[in-house]
Amino acid sequence: MKNLRHSLAVLMALTLSSPGIFAAQPRASTLQAGFERPPAAAKLRCYWWWLNGNTTAATITRDLTAMKSKGYGGAILVDANGANQQGNADVPAGPEFGSPQWTALYLHALKVAKQLGLEISLNITSGWNLGGPSVPPEDASKMLTFSRHIVNGGGRRSIALASPPLTNDFYRQIAIIAYPLRRGAQLPGEAASGRRAIENLPYKAAFKETGFSMPPSSGVLRNLPPAAGEADTLAGDVINVSAFANANGLLQWTFPSGTWEVLRIGYTDSGAKVSTSSGAWQGLAIDYMSRRAFDHYWRQTVAPLLDAARPYLGTSLRYLVTDSWELGGTNWTEGFRREFLARRGYDPLPYLPVIAGRIVQDRATSNRFLADLRRTVGDLIVSNHYDYFAEHAAKYGLGIHPESGGPHGAPIDALETFRNAAFAQTEFWAVSGWHRVKDNQRFFVKEASSAAHIYGKPYAAAEGFTSMGLAWAESPGANLKPTFDQALTEGLNRLIWHEFTSVPKEFGMPGREYFAGTHLNPNTTWWNQAGPILLAMNRAQFLMQQGRSISDLLYYRGDQVPGFVRVKADDPAHVLPGYDYDVTNEDALLHRITWSAGRLATPEGLRYRALALPRSGSLSLPALRWIERYVKAGGLLIGSRPQGPLGLLAPQEQRDYDEIANRMWQGCEGRQLASYGKGQIYCTLDSHAALLAFGVAADFSYSGEGSFDYIHRRTASADIYFVRNESNKPARAVLSFRIHGRTPELWQMDTGAISPAPVYIEHAGRTEVPLSFPASGSVFVIFRQPSTLHAVQVKRDGVSVFPSAIPGSGLYATRRGTLATAEPGNYVVDRSDGSQKHFKVARPVDEPKFEAEWKLTFPAGWGAPASVSLTKFDSWTASSNPGIRYFSGTAVYHGTLDVPADAALSGKQVWLDLGDVHEVATVMINGKQIETLWHPPFRVRIDQSLHAGSNPVEVHVTNLWPNRLIGDLQPGAHRYTQTNVNAYKKDSPLMPSGLLSPWSLSVATLQGSR
């Protein structure tokens, strides 16, 4: 039957001559062994969600055992709710976080995890934004607040100053200050003032977050051009009149003549609360700038949990965490004025009118004060919260890995928050059609990888595959695979899957769930097939943890707050394509980065060829002095003359700044490249052109169809590249690597297969590898062994062939280096010694064939018939039988493959191509499981399981939950599912399911050389 033809590629693989196209491959190395069987450190972790605190000891045991069986290395234990968001129903509350009942479950989890060899990280609050019901207003997050009063001076006045707005009945006064208004009472920006307001003041003063996706700092840093005479007052004219007011705000003071403003300014609670917490665990978020607030929370909440867990400290309990910043703005704390003076070198008090919208001194000075304010806020958040958190954890022998660097636009230096973490962790999101649609809204891994590199951390971790509104609809192949590949090229080497919800069995299938995330637990339809999928990811992570990262450029982003690193493609230094980069902040630049012979280096041995300056054009005086020493010593610098510091400098410091900048960049007049000391300065921020001008060849390039991205790591004995096709269409190109004299090998994360590249050319210190990729395809290209005799070109019927990056289609190489192909024709192989080999591939005469009849069987209890005979392959949703149309789960296609007795399969490879699959397929032949396929191409080698005669074939195909959930909403339908999730309606579109395309049979044999 035409529609029941199935695709098999039978490939005969012969060594073309002796000594052959390729030399014999070496025995398995440590690198290869770890790739085939990844160690515990390389295994993914997950967010283990105790939804509304509701789980049981039996469920905990089942969860952890299931994680272990599928290749997890551990989990973050997160007590949180969020079940009822996005219109979903709530779930019953379990024991309150930290209560005796909850602690008993937590200790049971640690006990089971220890038995299984799993690592647990504990989220130290319920939900996120650290805090809870015991946090008093004085320990809560703080915000400046003020009231103002206009006075026409010229005598003694008694004025009852209004109380500033306050939250939670909490207020602490900073000062009452008075100052003459040189331009009258109107605020800049008011119609009658004739002046424009300070741009983006609520964000510049850190009253608000700057957005929710690590927004660039350009909006905060942007300033309107100054105008003469626009100042409201001068800093020297601001008078502290606090001593003349009583506690109720009654001011008695003699005002000089003129128009004056009295500013009563203090701080109150910001109103920030714990988010997404369980049950009764509601309350205020703590002040992240206050060590006292952290100490109080630690003693009341965290220490009791750690003391109870002492038998597991350092074994199953390894880390403490908090989740992402969603506090909103914050800009003051107790002792802030003292800290500001110590860190910035001047008293902030005379500049506080800027907070109220006044221009002090001039517009530039006002903006510089605001930059200093934000910088101080960022410094205190790091030193008094994240550094302090690490100190407390270390006393128990634990590390921390908070998701501290965003993505909300907090007033932080995001990279600096990771400096004392055990490893850096950010996040990335699955593809969604409506939430975080663009890459710069969903990928934040470059920040984690940069932090890991500049601060010497072993892992660049990320909460991964978070999504909103998809509710079990994330396709493993179409969505998760390309997303994971992109995260790898951003620097990911430890995935923390979001999320695995702990669901007691009594809640049914698929059970209750958090409103966001790619749900993966034993209730997920494809859980039983998840092991090979997660193994592929673990293999990739193992390779990405080896050696050190290779990036030619270090981009210094400046000292601005807020400061984040977003998606790689942001490319702030204009270095892409062909090179990679890391981003450094000022802290790491001044305290960890060194140089030798003009090369920048970290203590761990990462090296960079050049330093690029901030795109903002601003850098601090300490950074400028460091950079001058670096260039004088032979360093390579990229960037134009800095415009100045972000913050205020004393007059002598400003003169020093200008002198350094003038002498460094004086050679740039009319030139693109200038010398300074032993080093060089490329005078514009075009890092790609600069590296070429400095003689640094591209690390990776390509020519041909499509678009490719890469990442590169190096060990003592190997160079590891990961290359991905960025397009959802097939592409082919000649990939060029900055490697010479070694054999490129193709390492497949899905199967663990390793083979030499079928064709490569060594030229001008580079290795060029022609390859064709499937849609969104990817491969590791690894250079370990010295180059030997190899093919430099293969032609088929006179046309050059692009070998396949993935075995089983086109021209490819086997593990032993033998060329194989299913495509008939006359082949010519040009070899690296100048010789040629010729061979012909003809269509085979005898070929295996599938019998015409196929059967599809379904599991009992889900509304589908036990079995149906197939007349064609189509989506289950096209069936007239509602039990099939709305089925979700695993159904099995049964067929028979007849192999003629004279088929002579010895020395051949037989590949089964399933075509269009939704979503995951496991192939079994003669009762033996062959492979699980989860992304295109759905192709598997099966010859090793075939014998002459009849061979029973089973293809276990699993779709996703939405179809059954939609089916249960049909009028009069029997309900098979139970869940709190209300993401679907009765008329929601169904998802294609099953095997959709007919399979065709093709057999090819590779002939020997003629």
Image (tube, rainbow, N blue to C red):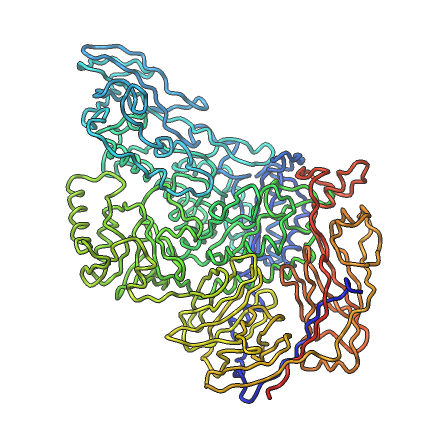
Query: Where residue 37 appears, x then y in whole percent?
Result: 58, 67
**Closer-to-camera residue (337/46):** 46
Residue at 30% x, 53% y: name it: 685
Query: Where residue 432 appears, x then y in whole percent?
Result: 57, 45
Specify the farthest residue to the front: 798
Residue at 77% x, 67% y: name it: 953
**Closer-to-camera residue (925/145):** 925
Q: Quadrant of the N terminus?
A: bottom right
Query: Where residue 503 appears, x then y in whole percent?
Result: 68, 45
User: Image quarter for residue 511?
Assistant: top right
Query: Where residue 486 appears, x then y in whole percent?
Result: 51, 56
Relative horizontal placement of residue 715, taking residue 12 as reference (left or right): left
Relative horizontal placement of residue 418, taking residue 875 as reference (left or right): left
Instruction: Give the total number of marks visible in the rendering.
Output: 0
Q: Quadrant of the C terminus?
A: bottom right
Is residue 58 visible in the rendered image? The answer is no
Relative to residue 209, is residue 579 depicted above or below?
below
**Closer-to-camera residue (973/145):** 973
Relative to residue 702, is residue 500 depicted above or below?
above
Relative horizontal placement of residue 22, taking residue 579 as reference (left or right): right
Residue at 40% x, 36% y: name it: 292
Is residue 877 visible in the rendered image? The answer is yes
Relative to residue 315, is residue 757 depicted above or below?
below
**Closer-to-camera residue (121/592):** 592
